[in-house]
Amino acid sequence: MSTVRVRCDWAHRQSRLEMVVTGHKATVELGLRGVPFHALLAGRMPELSRLVLSRLHEEIPAYRQLPVEELRGDISSITADTLRAFSRSLREDRPLSAAELEQITASAARRAEEGFPLAAVLTAYQLGTRITLAEITADAGPEDVADVRAVTDRVLAFLQDVVGAVTTGYLDELQIKFGQEHNARGALLSALLEGGQAEAGARSAGIELSPAYLVLSLAVGAHPDEVVPGVDAAIAVRRKLRRLLAEFDHFGRGSVLASLDGAGGVLLLPAGGEDWADWSGLLRRAARAAGAEVTAAGQVAGPAELPEAAERTAEVLEVVSWFGLAPGLYRLEDVLVEYQLTRPGAARDRLAALLDPLADRPELLETLHTYLADELNRRRTAARLHVHPNTVDYRLRRIRELTGIDPGHPAGLPRITAAVAARRAGVGPERRTR
C-alpha cells in the first residue's frame, strides 16, 4: 500500500474517532472507493499547501512580487488554514464556520492594508480551490461520478463563502484606508485655506505641495438625472461630482484638493505655466464631463496667499451670480465694475432701496429679473413667464412708474441692473426675492 494511501486511511480512522468523541452526526461521506474526500485532503495537506503556493507564485504575477518572508509566512499560513477549514467542513458536512471565515476576512484585510490587488487575492483562492479539487478527484473512476459531482457542488459553495469573506475584509479595510486618506486631504485643504502649517498635513496625505495653485470657487448646476422621478438623486449627484473631479485630476500637475457638494465648493489645482485660456478650457471640459452647468471664479496664488485668494474668488462667484452672468470661468478683472457696485456701503444700500416699491409686487420683480436675463427680449420673457407680451409691456411700465427707472432705456439699464445685483447681494434678507 502506498504511503499516501496509508496516510489517507489513518486520517479516515482519525475522523471517525473524532466524530464519536465530539458528538458530530455521522453522515454518508463523499469519497473515492470508500476513502472520504476529507481524508484524501487531510492525508496530503502539507503536499497540497506547497503545491498551491508554488502555483500561486508561478501563475499570478502579483505573488511573484511579494517578499519571500511574506510568501513563506502569512501567505503560507492562510493557505494551510484554508485547506484545513475546507477539510473540516467536508468531514463535518457543514459550511465554513464564522471563525473560519473570519480568518479569511482578516487575511484579506491585511492584503488591502498593504495595497495588494483584490483581483490577485480572489484569483489565488479560485486557483487554490481548483487545484485542490483536481488533486482529490484525480483517481476518480466511472463509479465515482456521483460523489465527484456532489463534492464539486460543495467546493463551489465553499468558494462562494470564501469570495464573500475576502471581498468583505478587503473592501472594509479599503474603506477605512480611503477614509483616512480623505480626512488627511481634508485637513491639508483646511490648513492651506486657513493659512496654517501645511507641511505636516502634506506628508500625512502623501502629497507634495505645489509652488502655486489655481483656486476655484465653484457653483455646480443640477444634472438632469437629479430631477428625474424614480432616479436616486444622491447617486446622480455623486456621479456628477466624480466626473467633474476626474477631469481636473486628468489635468495632471499633481494632487487636486477639493471640498465639494452637489451645489459646488472650493478646489485647489496645482498650477504651472498655464494661461487663462487653458483654465477656461479645462472648466468647459469638466462641465461637459459632469453634464451640468458650472460657474467658477478663479485666481492663481502661492501657498501663503491661498486664504485671501479663496475669500476673493468666493466673492467674485457671488457677484457673477448676483448679476446673472453666464456659466464659465471668471476673474476679478472680468467683473471689476460689478464687484465694486456690490461692495458693502451706503451706495449699495441706496441702490438696493431703488427696488423697494416692488417689494410687495413679486410678479413685477420676477418679470424684471427674467427680462434682464433674457437680454431685454420681451417675447422670450413672455414665453418663459407664460404670459402675453402685452402683459410684459404693462409690467415694465409699472416698474418704471414705481421706481422712476426705465428698464428698457439705455440710460436706465445700468442703474436698474445694479439695483437688482445690490438687492441680491444681501442688503437685508427682506429685500431678496424668494
Image (cartoon, rainbow, N blue to C red):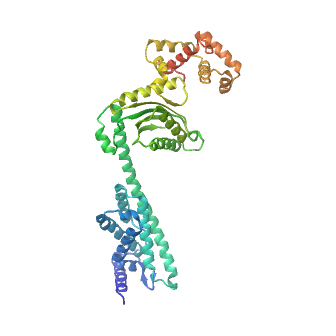
Residue at point 37% right, 40% down?
A: 186
| Vertical placement of residue 299 versus 48, above or below | above
**Quadrant housing the C terminus:** top right
Where does the image place residue 407, in percent across and percent down from the top left? 61, 15
Left/right placement of residue 1 relative to residue 219 reads left
| Vertical placement of residue 384 versus 209, above or below | above
The answer to whether residue 26 of the structure is visible from this angle is no
Tell me where residue 301 sits by quadrant.
top left
- Pick out the residue farthest to the bottom: 1
Where does the image place residue 302, in percent across and percent down from the top left? 35, 32
- Please state which of residues 241 and 102 is positioned toward the viewer in this rendering: 241
Residue at point 45% right, 86% down?
A: 33
The answer to whether residue 118 of the structure is visible from this angle is yes
Where does the image place residue 23, in percent across and percent down from the top left? 36, 75
Where does the image place residue 242, in percent across and percent down from the top left? 48, 44
| Vertical placement of residue 209 versus 412, above or below | below
| Vertical placement of residue 152 versus 264, above or below | below
- Please state which of residues 341 and 350 is positioned toward the viewer in this rendering: 341
Q: How many marks?
A: 0
- Please state which of residues 378 and 236 is positioned toward the viewer in this rendering: 378
Tell me where residue 56 sits by quadrant.
bottom left
**Quadrant housing the N terminus:** bottom left
